[in-house]
Amino acid sequence: MYVQRLELVDFRSYERVAVDLSAGASVLVGPNGVGKTNLLEALGYVATLDSHRVATDAPLVRAGAAAAVIRCLVVHDGRELQVELEIVPGKANRARLGRSPVRRARDVLGALRMVLFAPEDLELVRGDPAERRRYLDDLLVARQPRYAGVRADYDRVVKQRNALLRTSYLARKTGGTRGGDLSTLDVWDAHLAQHGAELLAGRLELVTALAPFVAKAYDAVAAGRTAAGIAYRASIEVPPSPDRAALQEALLAALAAGRSSEVERGVTLTGPHRDDLVLTLGELPAKGYASHGESWSYALALRLAAYDLLRADGIEPVLALDDVFAELDAGRRERLAELVGGATQLLVTCAVAEDVPASLQGARFEIAEGVVRRVE
Ligand SMILES: Nc1ncnc2c1ncn2[C@@H]1O[C@H](COP(=O)(O)OP(=O)(O)OP(=O)(O)O)[C@@H](O)[C@H]1O
């Protein structure tokens, strides 16, 4: 698949912009701060309903404007589909597929599949488990969009269960009598185990499928002597044959066993929202041990592995590399160019066009003062 046209209204630095793109490689060139990443971020938002840079929507709307619109025309298997999202901070996004409004914004997921590598991805290796969970869940959704619903249901249950535990905790702390009632906790345990088992089963399957791609991608990126490995670390003991029913039972048992400490601390301590994806290089964990260069290569390998896995599934995602080539020496640039050169659509941003290897120099766009101009 590829994006044929991207239109933005009041998104980030852009008041109004339209960019006609094509399949193959495109290089987006411009000085720092000119709005290159903003374009990739907009596409990434259509693909995941999330920004790779900020946790809330407000910064995505141009300063002084009330709402932002992202519209993009995606070509997939020869068919064109327009996806439109309106972002109004503090409110649910409004979305359209083709000419029709959709009930929930998440119904557009799957219309654009994209893998974006950006400097922020260093956090995949160095940051908190939440970064790695998001990486897994975004990939899960890209492979099977129905997981967006599973994820939303699970998040809602954790939030409500936490609210219940917290209210009871605060009531006890302040010696009050109201709000301390935990009689519905069993119901929330059942919901958490049900949705949690589905999410956990999806992640476990994903990690098994992804692991060989990560090892291969790291080897290709770093040409390293050290092998990269990934493993899922769950907050429960994972049963030997982790189907949904077995996971649901294991979650219920762990919730029962941990109830007193959860009640004492006023928070849900068991479930996939506490899990991590452990990254290793040889025998050592990457986090805390890997050098800057190794961490960077690892983060890139995670994205390239996601891209390769989607391709192996028969999905040809758009691949976007934000500010990558300036970080690399000549040898690594060429190696990366070889790895990504065959992408159906490759979008590369850079401040200096010469940093991008000649083999990837397809269409070139120059960005200046809110205008994106195709020059080649
Ligand atoms: N909500 C917003 N309203 C107005 N301007 C914004 C908003 N959010 C970001 N900007 C502006 O967008 C610019 C950053 O754009 P972007 O991150 O795309 O730059 P870039 O071209 O990728 O730069 P670099 O090469 O440094 O990575 C900054 O000048 C910033 O002030």
Image (cartoon, helix red, strand yellow):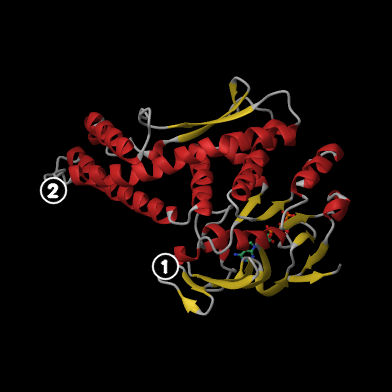
At label 1, counting other C-alpha atoms closer than 10 Å, the crowd grade (few under 14, some 14-19, many 20 or more) is: few
Three-letter amino acid code at the position of disc 1: Arg
Q: Which mark is residue 169?
A: none
Q: Is residue 129 left or right of residue 287?
A: left
Q: Residue extending furthest top?
A: 283
Confirm or deny contact between disc 2 and disc 1 (CB under 8 A): no
Q: Is residue 66 left or right of residue 201?
A: right
Residue at horizontal 38 percent and vertical 52 percent from the top? 150
Q: Nearer the viewer, mark 2 or mark 1?
A: 1
Sequence-wise, the earlier of marks 2 and 1 is 1
Q: Residue extending furthest bottom?
A: 99
Residue at image mark 1: 104
Q: Is residue 357 left or right of residue 144?
A: right
Residue at horizontal 67 percent and vertical 66 percent from the top? 3
Q: Which mark is residue 178?
A: 2
Question: Residue 39 at x, y = what percent?
Answer: 67, 63
Residue at horizontal 60 percent and vertical 19 percent from the top? 283
Q: Residue 375 lies in what quarter of the image?
A: bottom right
Instruction: Tell me the quarter of the image containing the C terminus.
Output: bottom right
At label 2, counting other C-alpha atoms closer than 10 Å, the crowd grade (few under 14, some 14-19, many 20 or more) is: few
Relative to 179, is 21 above or below?
below
Three-letter amino acid code at the position of disc 2: Arg
Q: Say which of 164 and 99 sits in front.
A: 99
Q: Is residue 369 visible?
A: yes
Question: Residue 169 at x, y = what percent?
Answer: 22, 40
For the residues labelled 2 and 1, the Cα–Cα distance comes to 36 Å
